[in-house]
């Protein structure tokens, strides 16, 4: 099992979401990832951090979002953790249903499920873990 390192800690300000891109770029260079994998990780992590800042921590600058990375033999595992109470991840509406297709927002979790090879929640939903196969 690889070691888990806290790689990035951000105050819960939406302006800090831009810092996710440079973090992902460092990961891509370190592990020589493909452009497709780069895109999938960037979009998924951006969505997860955005949700953590807005929905988990309610944009409270005194609260932080942590992103950690664990390298396994043939995968990368990212965890995004906020200081919120979590949410019921089993009751999210389907953004692809015809009555919701025109709504703005509500697609982040759906995108993360589509782009990550495996996704799971911890701590009642205040931590999301995203796995990407190498």
Image (cartoon, rainbow, N blue to C red):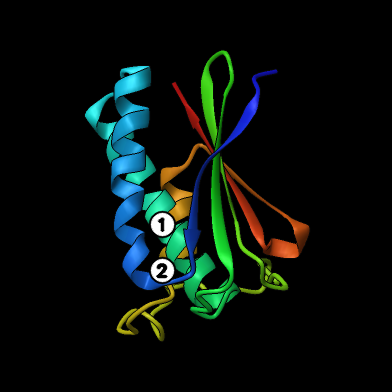
Q: Please give the name of the residue rendered at 40% of the width and 83% of the height, measured from the top-left corner.
A: 100
Q: Where is residue 10? Give x, y as percent.
A: 47, 58
- Along the line of sight, the residue nearer the viewer: 117 or 128: 128
Which residue reaches farthest left?
35
Image quarter hosting the N terminus: top right
- Which residue matches tag 1? 111
Q: How far apart are marks 2 and 1 (CA)?
A: 6 Å
The answer to the question of whether label 2 and label 1 lie on touching residues, with beta carbons closer than 8 A, is: yes
- Which residue matches tag 2? 107
Please tell me how many numbered marks the rendered image carries.
2
Image quarter hosting the C terminus: top left
Can residue 93 be seen here? The reply is: no
Q: Where is residue 111? Give x, y as percent.
A: 41, 57
Q: Please give the name of the residue rendered at 34% of the width and 79% of the height, measured from the top-left corner.
A: 101
Can residue 46 be seen here? The reply is: yes
- Along the line of sight, the residue nearer the viewer: 103 or 23: 23
Q: Please give the name of the residue rendered at 54% of the width and 80% of the height, measured from the top-left corner.
A: 58
Q: Where is residue 6? Give x, y as percent.
A: 58, 39
Looking at the image, residue 39 lies above or below residue 101? above
Looking at the image, residue 76 lies above or below residue 31? below
Which residue reaches farthest right?
123
- Along the line of sight, the residue nearer the viewer: 52 or 118: 52
């Amino acid at each position: 099992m690889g070691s888990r390192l806290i790689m990035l800690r951000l105050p819960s300000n939406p302006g800090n979401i831009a810092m996710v891109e440079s973090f992902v770029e460092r990961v891509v260079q370190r592990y020589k990832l493909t452009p497709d994998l780069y895109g999938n990780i960037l979009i998924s992590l951006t969505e997860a951090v955005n949700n953590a800042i807005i929905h988990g921590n309610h944009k409270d600058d005194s609260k932080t979002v942590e992103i950690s990375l664990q390298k396994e033999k043939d995968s990368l595992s990212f965890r995004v953790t906020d200081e919120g109470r979590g949410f019921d991840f089993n009751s999210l509406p389907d953004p692809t249903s015809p009555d919701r297709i025109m709504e703005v927002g509500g697609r982040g979790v759906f995108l993360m499920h589509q782009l990550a090879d495996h996704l799971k929640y911890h701590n009642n939903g205040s931590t999301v873990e995203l796995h990407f196969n190498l």
